[in-house]
Structure formats: structure tokens, C-alpha cells
Image: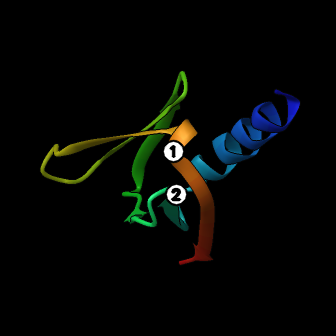
Amino acid sequence: MKKNNRFRKLLEKYLEIKGLDIVVVLDDGTEIELYKNRQLIDDMIITMDNYQNKQQIPLSRIKSVDMFAA
């Protein structure tokens, strides 16, 4: 449980950095690049593009996270 909490706190900090490109890899191997408009609500990453298309990604499905400085 402590490991999940540390992951969540660290991810929350990185999500706030708008100059950081973030790609999450889900447990099924799917890669999703997060839009700059993103936030962590409860145990869900909410990301929205410029056209208001919203995507919700449960933290429980995330296998890994890759980050790139833009």
C-alpha cells in the first residue's frame, strides 16, 4: 500500500509540470500520451485535448510511466 501511495504522490508532482511530455504504459501494453491538460483525481488520471475530448486512466492499470522534457 505504501508503494502505491508513493507512486501516486510522485506522479501527481510530474503531472503538474506542463513542459513534461508523459506517456503511460498500461498493463495490456497500450501506450497513451497524456495531453498537457491533465490532472489526478482520486485514483484516475484525467486528460483532455483541445477539443474537450476527455480520457480517464485508472492508476491501477498503469504498468509504467515514461517522461520526456519538451
Q: Residue at x 70, y 45 (%)?
A: 13
Q: What is the residue that sits farthest to the right in this orientation? A: 2
- Measured as percent of width and height from the top left, residue 70 is found at 53, 78
- Measured as percent of width and height from the top left, residue 68 is found at 59, 76
Mark 1 element type: helix
Q: Residue at x 58, y 49 (%)?
A: 15
Q: What is the residue that sits farthest to the left in this orientation? A: 51
Q: Nearer the viewer, mark 1 or mark 2?
A: 1
Q: Quadrant of the N terminus?
A: top right
Mark 2 surroundings within 10 Å by alpha-carbon count, few (fewer than 14), some (14 through 19), many (20 or more): some
Mark 2 element type: loop
Instruction: Name above or below for residue 67 compared with residue 4.
Output: below
Per the model, the C-alpha gap separating discs 1 and 2 is 23 Å
- Residue at image mark 1: 61
Residue 47, quarter of picture: top left
Residue 69, quarter of picture: bottom right
Q: Residue at x 24, y 53 (%)?
A: 49
- Which amino acid type corresponds to the residue marked 2 in the rendered image? Lys
User: Is residue 17 found left or right of 8 in the rendered image?
Assistant: left
User: Is residue 42 found left or right of 46 in the rendered image?
Assistant: right
Question: Which callout, 1 or 2, points at the residue further toward the start of the chain?
Answer: 2
Q: Which mark is residue 48?
A: none
- Measured as percent of width and height from the top left, residue 35 is found at 36, 57
The answer to whether the residues at label 1 and label 2 have Cβ atoms under 8 Å apart is no
- Residue at image mark 2: 18
- Which amino acid type corresponds to the residue marked 1 in the rendered image? Arg
User: Is residue 21 found left or right of 12 in the rendered image?
Assistant: left
Residue 2, quarter of picture: top right
- Measured as percent of width and height from the top left, residue 59 is found at 55, 39
